[in-house]
Amino acid sequence: MERISHSPEALFHVLAHFEAADEPLRGSLRRAGFTDEEIDGQLRMPGSKFLRSFARSPEEAVARLQRDFPGSFTALRPEADGRVRLSFRYDEPVGTSGLASDAELTPAERATVRSILRNGCPVRTVRTSRTITTGTCQLVLERTGEAGYALRTLFPGELAPPLPLPGEAPDPFWATHLLIDFN
């Protein structure tokens, strides 16, 4: 089984897909220069969230995937960009999906659509009380030479195109899909 490292930046990025950060994770992120305000802001980000019953931290989620699907972590084959994209499906919910299609919104939900900045990029969100659970989760790793792989992202739900970086044009997918704001 391949070794997977977790940089503070990757842990901070993935934290947006969790509901809370335990004290060991908070301490690690503080030592890396992140403030409690930044950590709490990341936790409040709209989007998909892992259920606490599945995992309470990114490290715990990766360890659980390695334990539950050991065959997926042997002989990993990076794509041309050096990344490995793994999709896992459980029979029970592991989290909430953070995506909605324009076509499935009710008139009341359409009235709540707004644009927010996420990591410096404008993204559309919709406020809804509907919870859409999912048994699927995605793990993206990047080869780090002979030492193994590094965590790049981890989230519950289907694989969608990445959100654009500042100055990049968004994938056409984001013109018809929104992040769900459950707050």
Image (cartoon, rainbow, N blue to C red):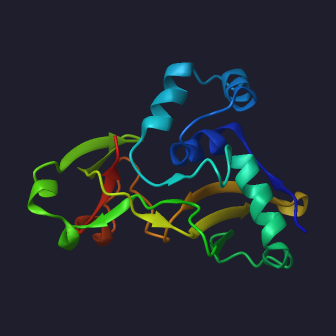
Which residue occupies 50% across, 28% down?
40
Q: In the picture provided, is 57 more to the left or to the right than 70? A: left
Residue occupying image coordinates x 64% and y 22%: 33
Screen quadrant of the C terminus: top left
Number of numbered discs on residues: 0
Above or below, 169 against 20 in this view is below
Residue 43 appears left or right of 131: right
In the depicted view, which residue is nearer to us: 83 or 70? 70
Quadrant occupied by the N terminus: bottom right
The image position of residue 133, as x and y in percent, is 46, 64
Q: Nearer the viewer, residue 31 or 22?
A: 22
Residue 100 visible at all? yes
Q: Quadrant of residue 174?
A: bottom left
Q: Is residue 20 above or below residue 26?
A: below
The reply to whether residue 144 is in sight is: no
**Residue 149 rendering spot, x and y as whole percentages:** 79, 60
Q: Is residue 165 left or right of residue 60?
A: left
x and y percent of residue 74 in the render?
A: 86, 76
- At horizontal 13% and vertical 57% (from top left) the residue drawn is 110
- At which x and y percent is residue 5? 80, 50
| Residue at image coords 58%, 42% | 15
Is 153 situated above or below 46? below
Q: Quadrant of residue 41?
A: top left
